[in-house]
Amino acid sequence: MKITRLGHSCFVISTNKGKNVMVDPFLGQNPACPREFLQEKYLKKIDTVFLTHGHFDHISGLSEVKAANPEVLVVAQYELALKLMGEGYNVFPLNYGGSYREDTFEVTMVNAVHTSSFGETQGPPALVGLPCGYILNVFGEKVLYISGDTNVMADMKIIQDIYHPTVAILACSGQFVMGVREATYALNNLLAVEKVIPCHTFPKVDESANPEMMAGLVEGFPVIQFMVGQDQELKEAMEGTDVEVCVMTYGETLEI
């Protein structure tokens, strides 16, 4: 299994059997995403998309994926799925505890503590159900917990006990999701993963793939400046434990 970070909470998980799953597409509007990952040649390889909720920084790139691969399968929570179905997407709706299964993997929707709206950057937001996380079980490879945007929650212990993930993609930036303190608690007390990839963070302006766009995003959404650097903070907080914190740069691929 290979995991590529495209920025913020957008990842591509490539299995050894050739499946390419994108989580929370944040592409053209994402100044952290290296430009080569926006090309049609790359995006047409994406065959499945998991959406954790409807906020723009998790869904704005979905139309770009669909333009490259009109048949891409979108897995989403029921109300958000209905919204997308009405817009012509190929959707598989789930709700909590439900699963989608293919020959090579199974994905199960699990709880998250956050909110979910749609179209908040274009006008009044529409509520589209509730947020979620996912357990991705790639048969013969790894079981991966994708937290989505969430605070720490006792449900993480239930998720660990039922599904036994060994790798987690875990939000830790604070402001809109749990911060380093809460993520550290989750890793030390609720989850039993061997590796964790921190997410929901942004790069510094001069370290982004598109510095001009990043500067504009910070100007338009000043809170973004408070979501920088927490990846490394989590790594430092977990030093001396059995959990390996894998801080990924944007465009980096990690093989696990």
Image (cartoon, rainbow, N blue to C red):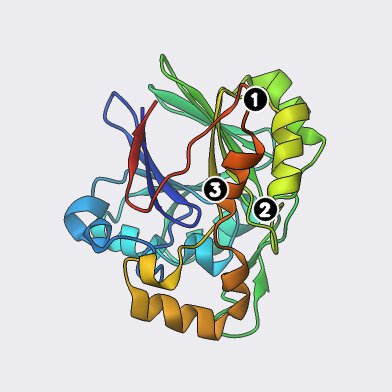
Residue extending farthest to the left is: 41
The residue pinned by badge 3 equals 232
> Can the viewer see residue 79 in this picture?
yes
* Tag nearer the camera, 3 or 2: 3
Report the residue at 36% width, 27% height from top.
Answer: 1
* Tag nearer the camera, 1 or 2: 1
Q: Marks 3/1: CA distance?
A: 15 Å
Residue extending farthest to the right is: 154
Name the residue nearer the viewer: 135 or 220. 220
Which mark identifies residue 131? Answer: 2
Horizontal and vertical percent position of residue 256: 39, 25
N-terminal of the pair, mark 3 or mark 2, is 2
Q: Please name the amino acid that badge 3 sits on.
A: Gln
Which mark identifies residue 38? Answer: none
Q: Residues within 10 Å of mark 2 (few under 14, many from 20)?
A: many
Q: Marks 3/2: CA distance?
A: 26 Å
Q: Secondary structure at mark 1?
A: loop
Q: Please name the amino acid that badge 1 sits on.
A: Thr
Q: Please name the amino acid that badge 2 sits on.
A: Pro
The residue pinned by badge 1 equals 241
